[in-house]
Image (tube, grey):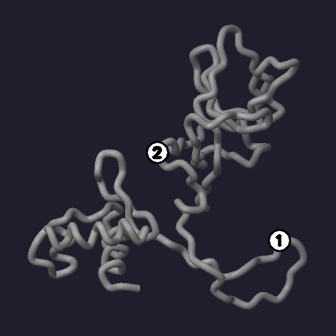
Amino acid sequence: MEKRILKLKEFYRSNRRMPTYTEMMKLWGYKTKSAVAYAVQKFIEEGFISKDRSGKLAPKNLNDLKILGLIEAGFPTSAAEEMIDTMSLDEYLVENKEATYMLKVKGDSMIDAGIMQGDLVLVERGATAKSGDIVVAEIDGEYTLKFYRLKNKKPYLEAGNSKYPDIHPKQELKIEAVVRSVIRKY
């Protein structure tokens, strides 16, 4: 891979942010910001980086991870390590970057759905919820993470833990976001 991209990856990994144009001048040994701007535009066109709404640079394909093969989750089989592809977690997990954000889970009401206290949930605002989706909902002025359900065309929330009762709105139930993935660090 091109040295400039490798240096961007290295900077991003170390600093958890994209470098400024001045920092890129130093990284790449450029003498002018216009030369950096030209290179940045090329990298945007090639899909390595992007700009958000405010014009800030954002990594796109800078944090790719190797996909080394398949692992059997049933009976053990022999496995040879073989690089299949590379992929960034953003590319895999996020469909609509502008509408996606993370929340840290507190409590145990979703443990039977595999969502534990301390997990992060990646949620998409504005997505249409279907019965059975896990959602971030505002119910009677309070927010919670639950299954969205319909019974006789009336919406309610169901916990992923039998210790908790179903929650039926007294006044209003609004879906704020739909859960797209759960992230757990061991």
Q: Amino acid at mark 2?
A: Glu
Q: Which is more toward the observer, 31 or 38?
A: 38
Q: Residue furthest top?
A: 171
In screen coordinates, is 148 left or right of 101?
Answer: right
Packing grade of label 2 (10 A; few <14, some 14-19, many >=20) is few
The label on residue 21 is none
Q: How many numbered marks appear? A: 2
Residue 80 is drawn in which quadrant?
bottom right
Looking at the picture, how far across and down is residue 27, in whole percent?
21, 77
Looking at the figure, which quarter contains the N terminus? bottom left
| SS for dot 1 | loop
Q: Amino acid at mark 1?
A: Ala
Q: Which residue is mark 2?
A: 98
Question: Does 170 sit above or below residue 123?
Answer: above
Looking at the picture, how far across and down is residue 171, in whole percent?
66, 8
Looking at the figure, which quarter contains the C terminus? bottom right
At 26% from the left and 73% from the top, the residue drawn is 39
In screen coordinates, is 84 left or right of 9?
Answer: right
Q: CA distance from mark 2 to mark 1?
A: 34 Å
Question: Does 29 sit above or below residue 153?
Answer: below
Q: Which is more toward the observer, 66 or 32?
A: 32
Q: Which residue is mark 1?
A: 73
At 30% from the left and 46% from the top, the residue drawn is 54
